[in-house]
Image (tube, helix red, strand yellow):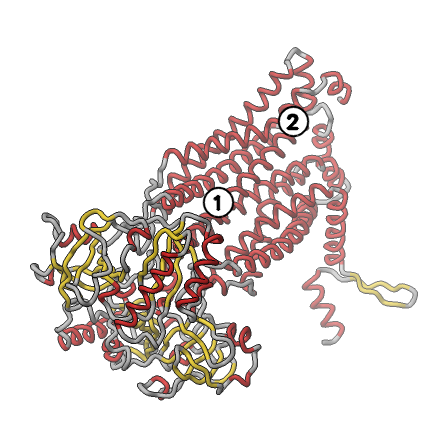
Amino acid sequence: MPRAEAVVQARREFGNVTRTAERGRETWQWPAVESLAFDVRYALRQLRMQPVFATVSVLILGLGIGASTTVFSVVKRLALEPLPVRAADRLVSVINTDLPALSAQTSTVATFEALQTMRSFEELTTYEAFFARASYKLTGDGEPERLAGVLVGDNFFSFLGVEPAAGRSFTADEGRKNGPGAVMLSHELWKRRYKSDRAVIGRQLRINDRAATIVGVLPPTFDFGEIFAPGVKIDLYMPAILEDMRNWGNALAIVGRLRTGTPFNAAQAEANLTSARLQREHPDRGDPGSYGAILKHLGTTLTGNLRRPMMVLWAAVGLVLLIVCVNLSSLLLARAASRRKEMAVRGALGAGKTRLVRQMLTETCVLALFGGGLGVAFAYAAVEYVRRFEGLSIPLLKTAYIDGTALATAAGITLLTALLFGLAPAFAAARHDLATAMKNDSRSATEGRDHRVTRSALVVSEVALACLLLVGAGLLLRRFVHVLDINLGLQPHGTYTLRVDPGAAIDTGDKSRAYLRTLITTARATPGVEAASVTDALPLESNRSWFLWAKEKSPKEGTDALVKLVGPRLLETMRTPLLAGREFNEQDDHNGAPVALINENLARRLWPNSDPLNGVVRCANVDWKVVGVVRDVRHLKVEESAGPELYLPVYARRATRSLYLVVRTNKLFSDVGPALRRALSDVAPDLPTAGFRPVADVVSRALSQRRFFVDLLTAFATIALLLAAIGIYGLISYSVTRRTAEIGIRMALGASGSQIFRAVVRDTLRLALAGVFLGIVAAVALSSLLASLLFNVSANDTGTYVFAAGLLLLVALAAAFFPAFRAGRISPMNALRAE
């Protein structure tokens, strides 16, 4: 660009540009840029002169901006962004029914095959829904190891757009019956066990005593558990052989991709027709909902229940940010008041109000810039900390990250915050003339009415915002405490469980019964073990359901019920009360009459007006005689009452792929565990005895999502309370300083120190009461947003409101104590002499 054009362009961008000559050199001057540079240097010099003010302000800003950036990154990943898979906006999950049990939502192989003929779908894939109940023993390549695995459709990874980091995905032949055995490794397993060696591709190994070839390694960016099973780590992926799974019942989770341009409603209508046709073709199944096909957007299925709590969390952070703004406004107003004389003198020397406002805003922006930088650093650390949480059943949480959008948001929040807390002090400093400033700067001057009004408004608003956040956190915290106090129908503490996979060698019912009896007997004989048994379904973890009905009634009066296979004395081991009849014993096996236990809920549904004992339940084409009634156990969710449950004797069934050994001890497990592991290893050398875990951890994991949100909201409420205390203390302290001469005069006229103390405290409490009132009114108005998040706690719970109000008043009283105490000790002579 020619020099003349460059000068014109520069003038447009930077204002007037002048050229000067200095010792034969031409120099260009840019007044606007130099003026801005001067403002920045002056702002930095001012901050260096007041290190305490600068440090406190930057820390407060960093806390608010960091918290908001962190939550934005998490909310964006969980609730705003599409899933990290190909064509996520067109992906739908296909469920059997809307019932909460997993087996009620999953589908049969016949359903999957029928849906593949639909014109609305571009492609479908599937995976084994109950993978969490199976584990795989890897042998033939190094030390034997028990690993978690999942069966997936042969097109599963190509469907999701996941490219292997090494090797390839499955082929269609590997998904057929008697096809070549194949396995893909997770990136973590490949790195840990095989040291990231690409030569493992093509290597032979054995999985559950069956030959398989390593054909590929998943990339580190893909985590099956993080999307489809939060908190579960998957090591192995094998192709699902649908022909072998045909008799498994509802065992498949189906995911489909709609064709481009296909309306969702049209796809659902076609799915309804396909479902009705399947039901006509398979009238043998008693459950009328065996072949349902309800479409739901995959993102909604996985994270839909998180959207409301995440929005509440985001609102909480917004309140914290507003409190930060109020705090900093009060600090800057106090600072601006002390600089009124300086601003007035500069104005008298020719600086216009616009120039003064710009100077003040520049100082505010410099302060915000430092706070924003600290906030981004804090956000990076906080997001990384959140990503490392273990045992949280929150999908996609580990994939949260700080990206360009988050950084842009942080920059926007920083700028907005700078404007919010900087404009009022800037205009306040610029509107004073020299005479007024010199007058008000007198040591004898009392605090002006406008300053009292501003200070009072800041205190009231800060208390109101803190009250609103404290009430919300208090309601959710009370809800969580209620959940913890619920009677689950069992006593998890003191109970420990171990995954038991008999393996391919245990392939008959007789071998399975002998194997399980040996394990139970050995466990019971271990010193310190009170009771032991087995089950295939742990509460709050497994949720298989079957359709059943009372034999003497019509199947139309039947219901879906959770089904559990249990061993003798399981109720004793889990401390689940038996209300009527008897528990299973060793004789309840395949040689005896089929017997069952039912819970209270199922008893009321099937026999509402009669005794359920000796009644007969028709389920899985077998007539089961009811021999006992069991107390309801909250099996699906802690917050939900128990639904119908059916207990079947494990010895009456064929060998299952996965069971849990459950033991109860009245001692520390660290004292009992070593002997128990040795004893079990002696009778079952392949049993991974290191895998014992407390049943209490199962309950804790089921509550992890709620605990995560409650802990974060409580942390934000605590921060808000602390910031409110700091803000009230700063404003009252500043007010006392400004009123020193007035207080000295009042004391000279006869007011005592205690009267001055009470007056300051009374003024503070009056403002705090006004803020509490406004906060409670706002909390009541917004309580409907929290109603769906509460359990056994009213959104207008009086106790929580009273507690929040009392706590804030105590905080205000504590914050006002030291300034009031200092005011009461002012010497009239010193105050008048200072005048």
Report which residue position mark 1 lands on. 714
Instruction: Please tell me in which quadrant of the rendered image residue 70 appears.
Output: bottom right
* Residue at figure coordinates x 18%, y 50% from the top left: 581
Under circle 2, the secondary element is helix
Report which residue position mark 2 lands on. 736
* Residue at figure coordinates x 56%, y 78% from the top left: 196
Considering only vertical position in the picture, is 729 above or below 712?
above
Q: Nearer the viewer, residue 519 or 824?
A: 519
Q: Label 1 crowding class (10 Å Cα cut-off): few <14, some 14-19, many 20+? A: many
Q: Is residue 206 left or right of residue 624?
A: right
Q: Label 2 crowding class (10 Å Cα cut-off): few <14, some 14-19, many 20+? A: many
Instruction: Please tell me in which quadrant of the rendered image residue 113 appears.
Output: bottom left
Under circle 1, the secondary element is helix
Q: Amino acid at mark 1?
A: Thr
Q: CA distance from mark 1 to mark 2?
A: 33 Å
* Residue at figure coordinates x 48%, y 45% from the top left: 714
| Image quarter of the N terminus | bottom right
Q: Amino acid at mark 2?
A: Val
